[in-house]
Image (cartoon, rainbow, N blue to C red):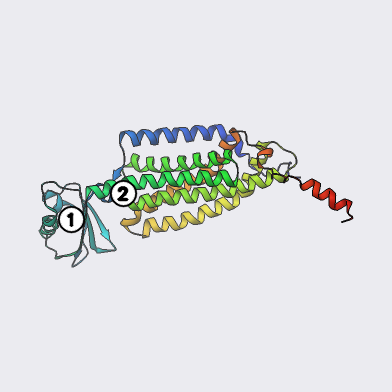
Amino acid sequence: MFESRLKGEIDFLKWRRATGLISTVLLVVSIASLAVRGLVFGIDFTGGTLVEVGYSQAVDLEPVRASLDEAGFEGAVVQHFGTAKDVLVRIAPKEDVEQSQLSDRILDALRAGDLEVEMRRVEFVGPQVGEELTEQGGLAMLIALAAIFIYVMFRFEWKFSAGAVAALFHDVIITLGFFSLLGLEFDLTVLAAVLAVIGYSLNDTIVVFDRIRENFRRMRRGTSRTIINTSLNQTLARTLMTSLTTLLVLIALFFLGGELIHGFATALIVGVLIGTYSSIYVASMIALRLGVQKADLMPVAKEGANADVDTLRDSGF
């Protein structure tokens, strides 16, 4: 019987108040950090200069940073790029230095050491371009959330749609708050990861909602609370397997992928963990609080369908 409790079933809804408190605390801390500290925007958003250089042999990054600090480039971001011989330098915009001279000054500062240095690549990002990227990135997230709300509303019901969008806002804000709180650099790769988190979390939520809708139509008895709890248990194995396999790839990327994708991998790791949690304890719980019930998800009977059936029966079919 569907209405009977599955053997070994986890009562997810028993902890809905505790998890609601946890989500509230995480959201408050994230919003406060974003309001007070803000995000540490990378060169993609602030503008500046990116220089890629190659050394004749492996080089430690600390002497490179020290040379740049002595030359007046305090706060430069220095990272290995591919191998220990290749170094990527990011410099914030400098009003007192022309862009055409900036790369030469950086190269002169790096050549102050004993190692040979070769210029590989120079890129300039203007402040106006960075401002446009910031606006377009924020607009992309808002459009994605609005489109998701409309999609879920037409596919399911507006109460599920509200739960799905609330879960996505929950995931995005906490992920951004994590970067703000730890002072991690936020660049285009991290923005791409945040958008990927939206897609991942939505996919997980849709799977849960599909099962909830199916059980609302199949289970003749049972409250909304019982049906949602049963549905969460039935999709738990799939949710955990998907999350764990995704995390294994992301952890490998974090440790083996190099400095340039650390932010991308970090954002996705946080997003996958939060997204898995929100599919269970945010999206479904909000739909339950909004009063979703069997009548909301039952298929609409077509007008005249019963009359057609009676006519066929009377005709001997």
- Specify whether 163 is left or right of 302: left
Left or right of 290 on screen, residue 74: left
**Which amino acid type is marked by label 2?**
Leu
Q: Nearer the viewer, mark 1 or mark 2?
A: 2
Residue 185 place in picture, x, y as percent: 30, 47
In this view of the protein, which residue sits in the foreground, 62 or 233? 233
Q: Decide which of tag 1 and tag 2 comes sooner along the chain.
A: 1
Helix, strand or loop at mark 2: helix
Decide if residue 284 is in sight here: no
> Residue 5, how many percent across, how many down?
71, 41
Closer to the camera in the image, 291 or 72: 291
In this view of the protein, which residue sits in the foreground, 278 or 292?
292
In the displayed orientation, state which residue is furthest to the bottom: 56
In the rendered view, does 37 fall on the left or right side of 109?
Answer: right
Q: Residue at x 36, y 50 (%)?
A: 190
Q: Which residue is mark 1?
A: 64
Mark 2, residues whose alpha carbon is within 10 Å: few (<14), some, or many (≥20)?
some
| Residue to which mark 2 is pinned | 133
Q: Quadrant of the N terminus?
A: top right
On the image, the x and y values in percent for residue 315 come to: 88, 54
Q: Toward which corner of the image does residue 123 lie, by quadrant?
A: bottom left
Q: Are marks 1 and 2 in contact (CB under 8 Å)?
A: no
Residue at point 70% right, 45% down?
217
Q: Position of residue 249 (x, y in %)?
A: 45, 58
Q: Is residue 230 left or right of residue 37?
A: right
Tally of numbered tags = 2
